[in-house]
Structures are given as C-alpha cells and as structure tokens.
Amino acid sequence: MAVRSTLFKFAVVGVLNTLLTLAVIFALKLAFHMADAPANLLGYAVGLINGYSLNRRWTFAHRGRMTQSLPAFLLVQAVAYGVNLLVVLAAIAAGLNDYAAHVVGVLPYALISYLGSRHFAFASPSSGDRA
C-alpha cells in the first residue's frame, strides 16, 4: 500500500512539476527564442525546487535531515536530467519536433526520479539520523 500511495503522490507532484517545467521551457523558447538545452535546464531547475519541497514533505513524508536528503535528491535529479537531455537531443536529431521531444524526455526523467527519490534520496532514515 505504501508504494501505491507514494507512487500516486509522486505522480500528482510530477504532473504539477511537468506542467510548470514545460511552461517555463516553452515560454523561454517562444518569448526569448532560447535554444533547447538552456531552456530545458532552466525549466528543470524551476521544477527541481518545487519537486524537492513537495516530494520531501508530502510524497515521502521524509523526516530525515535535509543536509542528507537534499544532496542525494540533487544527485538523483542530475542523473535523471542527464538522461532527459540525451533523450531530448537524440529525439530532435532523429527528426522529432523539438517541443514533442521535450515531452518525450519527461518519461525517463520521471522514472529515474521516482526510483531514486524513493530508494535513495528519501529512503527511511535510521532512528539515529532523524532531525
């Protein structure tokens, strides 16, 4: 039951973050004619701040130290982002519309982000690690 609950909450946060992230990316591309890679980076940076806060408190109800969970979360997100960017750029190089490529890139990002957050960044701390 706990997996189903965290997966549902993660999905809700993920939908909010995806909408926020894609809105930032698309706005930067449309309004400022920003290239794909920097628009993608800034969009995911905005979502990162929102995602850490919501996932730590609501999704995983993590009570461990922020000094431990934040670096772990950032590492997970860096890996997820790296894979995302590779997928986006590969999809564009393969001829996919650049906006659609950003949407496709969300999928591996979400999978890596959930698994890494659940099993690494926000894993239940031992009783000695509680803040």
Image (cartoon, rainbow, N blue to C red):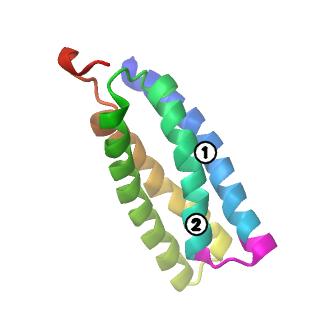
Q: Residue at (57%, 36%) from the top-left corner? A: 13
Kind of element beneath mark 2: helix
Does 12 appear above or below 39? above
Front in this rendered view, residue 10 or 76: 76
The reply to whether the magenta stretch includes residue 33 is yes
Comes first in the chain, label 1 or label 2: 1
Kind of element beneath mark 1: helix
Q: Which residues are magenta?
A: 29-36
In three-dimensional space, the C-alpha distance between marks 1 and 2, rounded to whole angstroms, equals 13 Å
Image coords of residue 20 (percent x, y): 67, 49
Q: Which mark is residue 17?
A: 1
Q: Residue at (25%, 23%) from the top-left corner? A: 125
Q: Which mark is residue 40?
A: 2
Q: Secondary structure of the magenta portion, mostly?
A: helix
66 left or right, relative to 123: right
Image coords of residue 128 (percent x, y): 18, 17
Q: Which mark is residue 25?
A: none
Does 76 appear above or below 14? below
Identify the image quadrant of residue 4.
top left
Image coords of residue 54 (percent x, y): 54, 32
Q: Amino acid at mark 2?
A: Asn
Quarter of the image with the C terminus is top left
The reply to whether the magenta stretch includes residue 39 is no
Does 103 appear above or below 75? below
Q: Residue at (44%, 56%) from the top-left corner? A: 108
Image coords of residue 1 (percent x, y): 39, 17
Does 87 appear above or below 66? below
